């Protein structure tokens, strides 16, 4: 399962409204090779479910992840921070053995 913090929920709803996303839009998360730690997170709005996608809903927000990425993201919480050290969506991933300083890449 992938969960969503209250802050991430509020920010995602606001962004979807600002970007005029359709009512069936959801958050698509994934993992791809790259970044300073070996794997990078992907995050985007989408409204097309693909074959093999895993679909979760938490706090009224639908989160979709492809089958391969799910192996790296199981148990992850999507959070949002607006602090002085930067702001944006953050992945709290219990599977990551190491993360980079910016939090956008990790290794297992």
Image (cartoon, helix red, strand yellow):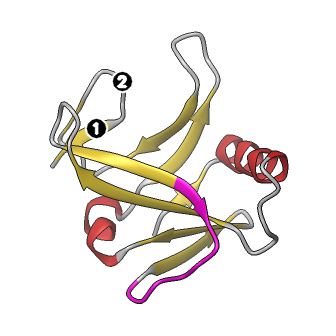
| Numbered badge on residue 53 | none
Q: Looking at the image, which residue is at 20% across and 43% down?
A: 34
- Tell me which residue sits at (58%, 24%) in the image: 87
| Number of numbered discs overlaid on the protein picture | 2
Query: What main secondary structure does the magenta stretch of the protein show?
Result: loop
Q: Is residue 100 magenta?
A: no
Question: In the picture shown, does residue 26 fall above or below 6?
Answer: below
Tag 2's secondary structure?
Answer: loop
Of residues 21 and 36, the one nearer the viewer is: 21
Residue pushed farthest front?
20
Give x and y (percent) for residue 39: 22, 46
To which residue does mark 1 refer? 105
Left/right of residue 46 with respect to residue 7 in the rendered view: left
Q: Residue drawn at (25%, 27%), measured in percent from left and top?
A: 100
Quadrant (top left, top right, bottom left, bottom right) of the N terminus: bottom left
Which secondary structure, mark 1?
A: strand
Q: Quadrant of residue 22?
A: bottom right
- Residue 95: x and y in percent read 25, 52
> Measured along the vertical axis of the image, is residue 107 above or below residue 54?
above
Sort mark 1 into few (<14), some (14-19) or many (20+) by Cα contacts within 10 Å.
Answer: many
* Left or right of 37 in this view: 72: right
Q: Is 104 left, or right, of 55 in this rendering?
A: left
**Around disc 2, counting alpha carbons within 10 Å, would you say few (fewer than 14), some (14 to 19), or many (20 or more)?**
few
Residue at point 63% right, 72% down?
57
Q: Which residue is mark 2?
A: 102
Range shown magenta: 44-52
Q: Nearer the viewer, residue 5 or 13?
A: 13
Question: Marks 2 and 1, how far apart in space?
Answer: 8 Å
From the top left corner, tell me how far across and down residue 74 is, in percent: 35, 65
- CB under 8 Å between discs 2 and 1: yes
Q: Position of residue 21 (x, y in %)?
A: 77, 61
């Amino acid at each position: 399962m992938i969960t969503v913090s209250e802050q991430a929920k509020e920010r995602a709803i606001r962004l979807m409204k600002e970007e005029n996303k359709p009512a069936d839009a959801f958050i698509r998360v994934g993992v791809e090779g790259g970044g300073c730690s070996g794997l990078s997170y992907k995050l985007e709005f989408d409204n097309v479910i693909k074959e093999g996608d895993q679909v979760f809903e938490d706090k009224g927000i639908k989160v979709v992840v492809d089958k391969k990425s799910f192996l790296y993201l199981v148990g992850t919480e999507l959070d949002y921070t607006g602090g002085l050290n930067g702001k944006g969506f953050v992945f709290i991933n219990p599977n990551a053995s190491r993360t980079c300083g910016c939090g956008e890449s990790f290794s297992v």
